[in-house]
Image (spheres, rainbow, N blue to C red):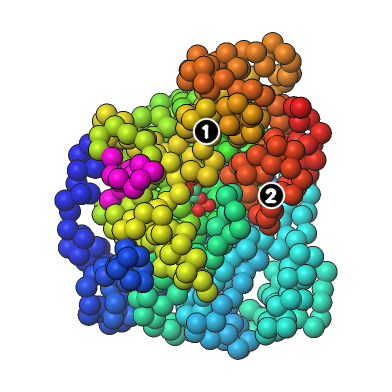
Amino acid sequence: MRVAQLSHCFLIPEFWGDIAKDFYWKSKHTGQFLDYNFDVKKGEIYIKCMEGATTNICYNVLDRNVHERKLGDKVAFYWEGNEPGDVMKVTYRELLQQVCQFANVLKSQGVKKGDRVSIYMPMVVELVVAMLACVRIGAVHSIVVSNGFYRGDKLINLKVIADDALQKFILCGVFTCVWFRQVPWNPEVDQCWRSLLSGASDECEPEWCDSEDPLFILYTSGSTGKPKGVLHTVSGYMLYVATTFKLVFDYQPDDVYWCTADIGWITGHSYITYGPLANGATSVLFEGLPTYPDVSRMWEIVDKYQVTKFYTAPTAIRLLMKYGSEPVQKYNRESLKVLGTVGEPINPEAWQWYYSVVGEKRCPVVDTFWQTETGGHVLTPLPAATPMKPGSATFPFFGVVPAILNESGEELEGPCEGYLVFKQPWPGVMRTVYGNHQRFETTYFKKFPGYYVSGDGCRRDKDGYYWITGRMDDMLNVSGHLLSTAEVESALGEHAAVAEAAVVSRLHPVKGESLYCFVTLTDGVGFNRTLEAELKKQVREKIGAIATPDFIQNAPSLPKTRSGKIMRRVLRKIARNEQDLGDLSTLADSSVIEQLFLNRCC
Ligand code: AMP
């Protein structure tokens, strides 16, 4: 409660102004600390932070650490490949050298300030090098996951997709492409990373950028529709991710931090690259799978590097939970101090397993709610300071002012449920949809003028805790009763046989919509009529007769985005037997779809 109250009354310019003093500014800001319009009725939506200041984020996360803070010899990343034993490490000094070299390579290829550079690389240190090299010279990166990566023992070659995309782009001016791993070669555009780097100087003066210059574009995960190019800018993003990283993970200089996200996702941008590096942290960077060569891999890595702060997604927790506690307990986890989760609502069952089995009831769990659009955490506990409630992202971060609105746009007081919105910006919020400011205003500001609309449903309990109930687009309306996906899914997840559940609506002649549930079972459990009846009973008892599922389908796998989010819009089409599945560009594994259609309940 104290945390929530604090964020309402604290003073934005003073709070962030003090934090800004820890960073290097080539010139100081002249305007207001935060200037904005959140109300479409008053004119164009804009957010500006520290206008007039100039800085460089690469300088702040590397040069400042090497030269001012004397952290040159500190390990920035322990890289752990897909194969155990395939390892390397890089210090802050080495990272700075490589970044300067690659920045010079980019310049020699004609890249200059403001240019957009697409990066399509696997989870390797060179990906961080490429990102930072772009921002060093003021170019804007746009990362699209990977060109070729290992999934267990399979090399997944995405170069074919990249080549296809390039065919289209070449017409508009792409002329070169640097490859890091061995892939089928196209001499017209492809060049080798290593040979380019070996000839480049390791000195490169940073390009000083305005606070509101674009920093990167990142396409949203596409769980609810066509991906949008979210644009973040330099200074506000830098301050916000550095501060949320420091406070939410209670960062200490001797920490070994590990975030399992992909860098091609916002979590990787903010909490593998920029947040940890801004603090001079040592991180683990992992290229492999949590289940390869076996389901103990994560805990083996925790033990090996003595990881102190660990950050993963509910999808990974639920996946590993399927195999029980034995694979976790094989390894020592005494080093762990804070456990984080992000990406989807975490059902209390998975939260308890994470807290009790992985963290041995010692480590606070920080359930961090945020979005590509928010840049960093917006609802989150602070470890050991916020009393936890399993499944709740608890309270807003400093300076974040949420509200819950009803369908008519009225702010609800006290315990309530409705649309989660934000009343004012924080430094790290997105500035526009790249190339389409109108889409930005329509998506986030039109429905409820005066507020940023997150698109998520949310409940506030009597103690003021916030509980995300899932995307509003995914809500179920059964006989006029609105049900959240998170609520029904967690009721299913409480059954010992269920590892993961996803609930969507199927049209019903009387009720309007009925519940169609997909369940992935715990390892070794078979699907049968008795289990189906038990699951229906469980949901009825937990939520009420209105929520009794009409259909339960056994789903060995669920369609997920590459960042691990369940694509309920695809499941809805399957439940309704609609063949046109919409935009599938971010679907991680398309082979699951056919199987789900085959097993459909009629
Ligand atoms: P993305 O922009 O791809 O990271 O997706 C953001 C969405 O993920 C949010 O709008 C939520 O629906 C969901 N999300 C992220 N973190 C959480 C969390 N801790 N609890 C509940 N939902 C979350």
Question: Can the viewer see residue 262?
Answer: no
Quadrant of the drawing holding the N terminus: top left
User: Dot 2 surroundings within 10 Å: few (below 14), some, or many (20 or more)?
Assistant: some
Q: Quadrant of residue 556?
A: top right
Q: Disc 1 to disc 2, how far (Cα)?
A: 29 Å
Which numbered mark, 1 or 2, is in the foreground of this view?
1
Residue found at x 25% / y 34%: 414
Left or right? Give the position of 288 relative to 333: right
Which residue corresponds to the image point at 42% horizontal and 32% vertical from the top-left? Answer: 391
- Which quadrant is home to the C terminus? top right
Q: Nearer the viewer, residue 569 or 167?
A: 569
Q: Residue furthest front?
A: 510
Front residue (pair 183, 416): 416
Amino acid bearing label 2:
Ala
314, 583: nearer the viewer: 583
Which mark, by number, is residue 477?
A: 1
On screen, residue 18 versus residue 135, left or right, reads left
Task: Give yes or no for contact between labels 1 and 2 (Cβ–Cβ under 8 Å).
Answer: no
**Helix, strand or loop for disc 2:** loop
For mark 2, what is the residue?
588
From this viewpoint, which residue is outermost toward the top?
Answer: 530
> Start and end of the magenta stretch?
401-412
